[in-house]
Every structure is written in structure tokens, then in C-alpha cells.
């Protein structure tokens, strides 16, 4: 699958023009989307793939705008998101019962977040999965409560965020200082004579491209298994699991209890039962696919 024929985004100045161009591509009806997806899956029809990609470029742009606060070129963020979209189209199975947009959002975010983490050297060196999650959630959570102060968080904001994000005050403070400090350029001179740069003194411990692609493929396989296992849930179970565990900002038990007219404890019971069903379904599918099952 090639990116040839897609609108080009050249620098920040071209962003407005790019957004205007991608709005010209028509959105697809569920029927047309299914037809094009089947044509690509069964015959690798390049025109069908192009229609699927171009109809979702606006989705990529919308997601990419949420990552503007990391000091990186928007053009690069959008480009990385488009790579994720093309991966999603390549793997999309229309017979699973989900729309492409639902499936593609995971791939788009994964591609963008990988780019952000590669670009922020202080994060890409020895950062755990939990820290990476906190890295992306903290900025949004601070904006939601109006915590815009420079430097350390106020005690009130610190208490609120530790409760919302489920981390310790120490972890939160450390990550906030990382974000507030930005990322020093590795090309900055180390000595006054300018002959040496910081990157010359850093060991190249980044994951090679082949390993990175293999890891993303395995993550993609697990994501596909999750999508497949969701089919075994009832509509209400699927909705509650998505709202509670698969969204950037999970819904509260109170919100879902009001939506369905049941108690918060009943919502919690449905969530637990649905999650257990998902785990069983994914483990069974992993066994069949010879993938290592989660602990």
C-alpha cells in the first residue's frame, strides 16, 4: 500500500491548505466502506485501499491535533498518523462488525505516540509502559482541571490528579517536571568550541527499526484479537467495556448507571463479567494463533 496520490503536507504553513484538501474526499457510507474493504482484503485492489484511506484522513488530522502540545511539527505528527491509518486499512477485516474508524483509531494513535516518544529523548530512554501512559495522559488531565501553572503543581491540583490518574504524588511530580522542562536538543553544543554535541556522548540504545516493527505487529495482533473477542459480548457489555476501559477518558460508574437505569454496583458487575469473558476469548484465540497469552 503506497502513500502516492495522497495530499502532501509541507510544514506548518501548509497545514491550512492540507486540511482544505482532505475535506474534498467524500466520507463513505457503511455499505461502500464494506464493499471497498472486501475488495482490498480479497483482491488487494489499490483503488479500494485509496478510497478507504482518503475517506479517513480527516480522522487522522483530528487525532493529530491532540498532540500539538509536545513541541513537534504538526506535519510530522499527521504523517505518522497517516502511516498508522494505512496499517489499519491493510489489516482491517470488515466481517468483524466494526467500522474502519473504530478500528483505525488505535493504529493512528499508536503510530503518533511512537513518534512522540522517539522524539522526546527523555522519555524514550528507559521509560516503562506505565510512565509512557502517564506521559500522554498528564497533559490532557492538567488542561481539564485548569492546571496551567509553571513549575510544580499546587497541592490541590496534585491531589486531584493523583486521584484521577491513579499514580503516586512522587511519580506525578517527576513526570510533570519532565514535561515542564521540555526536551533538550541532542544537537546542542557540549563545549564552548562547538566541536562536540550531547548526542556524541549518548549510547545508541534505541530499539532498531526491525525490532520496533515486530513489536508493533505483535501489538496489532493482540488488538485484532481484542476486536474479535468483543463480538462475544452483548451490546451492553461491549458499550460498558469500551466506556470504562478502552477510552482515553473512562466513563464513571455513575454516568453509566444513569444511562442504563441500573445501580453503580450493577454496572461494576457487568464490567467485571465482560472483562473476564474478553480474557477467556483472547486467551483461546491466542492459543490457536500460537501467540504468548497474557499473564
Image: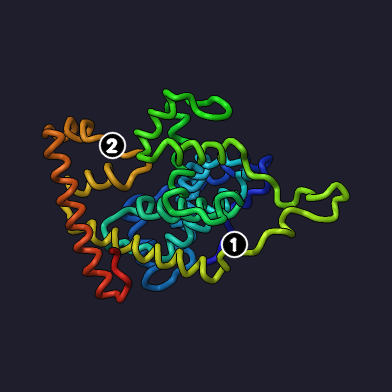
Residue 272 against residue 1 in the figure, above or below: above
Q: Is residue 34 placed above or below 58 in the rendered structure?
A: below
Give me the residue at 48% from left, 64% from top: 47
- 134 relative to 288 in the view: left or right: right
Q: How many labels does the image show?
A: 2
Circle 1 packing at 10 Å, graded few (<14), some (14-19), many (20+), is few
Q: Name the one closer to the observer, 273 or 162.
A: 162
Q: Tell me the residue at 79%/49% (across/down).
A: 189
Q: Which of 193 and 214 is in front in this view?
A: 193
Q: Where is residue 178 in the image (x, y as percent from the top left)?
A: 56, 41
**Residue depicted at x 52% and y 37%:** 176
In the picture, measured across the screen, residue 254 lies left or right of residue 1, that is left
Camera-side mark, 1 or 2: 2
Q: In which quarter of the image is residue 163?
A: top left
Residue at numbered disc 1:
4
**Colouring scheme applied when the structure was drawn:** rainbow
Around disc 2, counting alpha carbons within 10 Å, would you say few (fewer than 14), some (14 to 19), or many (20 or more)?
A: some
Percent x, y for residue 19? 56, 42
Residue farthest to the right, as pictured: 193
Residues under labels 1 and 2: Cα distance? Answer: 40 Å
- Across and down, in percent, residue 142 comes to 46, 31
Q: Is any atom of residue 48 visible in this view? A: no
- Which residue is rendered at x = 62% and y = 40% of the image? 182
Q: Which of marks 1 and 2 is nearer the N terminus?
A: 1
Q: Where is residue 53 in the image (x, y as percent from the top left)?
A: 47, 56
CB atoms at circles 1 and 2 under 8 Å apart? no
Q: Inspect this view and state whether residue 261 appears.
A: yes
Query: Which residue was labeled with disc 2?
Result: 251
Asked which secondary structure carries label 2, the reply is loop
Amino acid at each position: 500500500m503506497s502513500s502516492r496520490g495522497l495530499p502532501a503536507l509541507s510544514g506548518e504553513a501548509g497545514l491550512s491548505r492540507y486540511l482544505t484538501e482532505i475535506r474534498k474526499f467524500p466520507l463513505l457510507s457503511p455499505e461502500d466502506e464494506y464493499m471497498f474493504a472486501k475488495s482490498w482484503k480479497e483482491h488487494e485492489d489499490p483503488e479500494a485501499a485509496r478510497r478507504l484511506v482518503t475517506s479517513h484522513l480527516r480522522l487522522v488530522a483530528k487525532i493529530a491535533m491532540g498532540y500539538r502540545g509536545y513541541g513537534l511539527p504538526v506535519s510530522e505528527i499527521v504523517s505518522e498518523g497517516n502511516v498508522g491509518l494505512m496499517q489499519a486499512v491493510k489489516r482491517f477485516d470488515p466481517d468483524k462488525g466494526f467500522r474502519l474508524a473504530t478500528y483505525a483509531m488505535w493504529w493512528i494513535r499508536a503510530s503518533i505516540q511512537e513518534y512522540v516518544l522517539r522524539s522526546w529523548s527523555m522519555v524514550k530512554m528507559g521509560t516503562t509502559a506505565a510512565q509512557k501512559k502517564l506521559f500522554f495522559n498528564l497533559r490532557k488531565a492538567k488542561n481539564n482541571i485548569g492546571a496551567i501553572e509553571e513549575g510544580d503543581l499546587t497541592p490541590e491540583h496534585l491531589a486531584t490528579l493523583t486521584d484521577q490518574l491513579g499514580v503516586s504524588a512522587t511519580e506525578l511530580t517527576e513526570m510533570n517536571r519532565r514535561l515542564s522542562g521540555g526536551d533538550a536538543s541532542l544537537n546542542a553544543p557540549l563545549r564552548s568550541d562547538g566541536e562536540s554535541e550531547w548526542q556524541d556522548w549518548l549510547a545508541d540504545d534505541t530499539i532498531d527499526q526491525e525490532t520496533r516493527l515486530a513489536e508493533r505487529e505483535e501489538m496489532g495482533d493482540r488488538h485484532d484479537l481484542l476486536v474479535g473477542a468483543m463480538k462475544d459480548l452483548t451490546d451492553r457489555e461491549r458499550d460498558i467495556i469500551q466506556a470504562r476501559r478502552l477510552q482515553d477518558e473512562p466513563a464513571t460508574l455513575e454516568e453509566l448507571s444513569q444511562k442504563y437505569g441500573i445501580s453503580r454496583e450493577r454496572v461494576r458487575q457487568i464490567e467485571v463479567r465482560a472483562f473476564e469473558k474478553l480474557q477467556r476469548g483472547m486467551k483461546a484465540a491466542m492459543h490457536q494463533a500460537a501467540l504468548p497469552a497474557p499473564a
